[in-house]
Image (tube, helix red, strand yellow):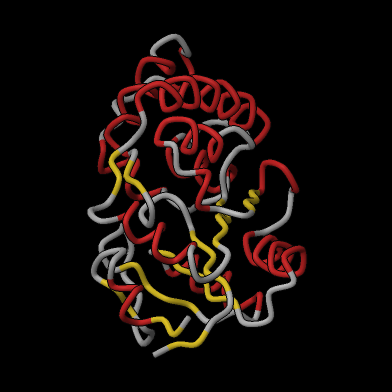
Amino acid sequence: MIKCDSVLFDLDGTLWDTTAALAEVWQAVIMDEPDARRTLTRQDMTGVMGMTSTELMRTLFPGLSDERGEELFEKLCIAEDDYLRKHGGILYDGLEETLRALSQKVPLAIISNCGPDYIPAFFDAHGLEKYFSDWECIGRTGLSKGENIRLVAERGGFKAPVYVGDTSMDQAAAQAAGVPFIFAAYGFGNVKDCPRVDGPAGLLELLEL
């Protein structure tokens, strides 16, 4: 078991799946953008989850300059946040029950490479904010995920946090922050040689709280 005094979470692929919704919403936006028109699929969105906005736009729209990509990304974020706030995403099985149980023992927080309104949209859609003591993202601080993990840990006075995520990028961020990493194997990535859970409820068996 892993002893900890707080649990920090990635969002996409760890707490919820929004890939189908984002493919549909983003597709509608880019149809009005002549230099960015293309077909977007759920698989396309799965492949870029966890990336920074610059990395994501370079992957999906390689013909755009970084400046144009950032401009378009802001439009996409506005559309996705509006949609998700109203309709939500797909929560992983047992998520709320797990968050409820964990939050009764230790503080919980979210750290994600997303825009400033994305995590609030998650909270608004699903009513889960009550389980979290803090959250942070690159869209608010401009910092890397590793730096934001460290920031949240320092802000909360956490001495033994763990970070739960679903990609090798999440693992690298946890390592950069000096925080143990737990692989959410039900998400989008493939990470080896680390503790793993096959669903949110697995954390209740893995963690010593």
Which image quadrant is residue 157 in? bottom right
Which image quadrant is residue 4 in? bottom right
Question: 3 and 21: which one is in front?
Answer: 3
What is the residue that sits farthest to the top in this orientation?
32
**Residue 201: image x %, image y %?**
28, 67
What is the residue that sits farthest to the front in this orientation?
104
Give the answer, above or below, for where 108 lies relative to 203: above
**Residue 166: image x %, image y %?**
38, 64
Residue at horizontal 57%, vertical 24%? 72
Q: Quadrant of the N terminus?
A: bottom left
Residue at horizontal 30%, vertical 45%? 91
**Residue 172: image x %, image y %?**
54, 73
Question: 106 and 2: which one is in front?
Answer: 106
Residue at horizontal 55%, vertical 31%? 64
**Residue 141: image x %, image y %?**
75, 48
2 displayed left or right of 109? left
Question: 182 and 146: which one is in front?
Answer: 182
Give the answer, above or below, for where 201 lies relative to 87: below
The mark total stands at 0
Residue at horizontal 58%, vertical 64%? 107
205 displayed left or right of 178? left
Give the answer, above or below, for where 16 lies relative to 57: below
145 displayed left or right of 61? right
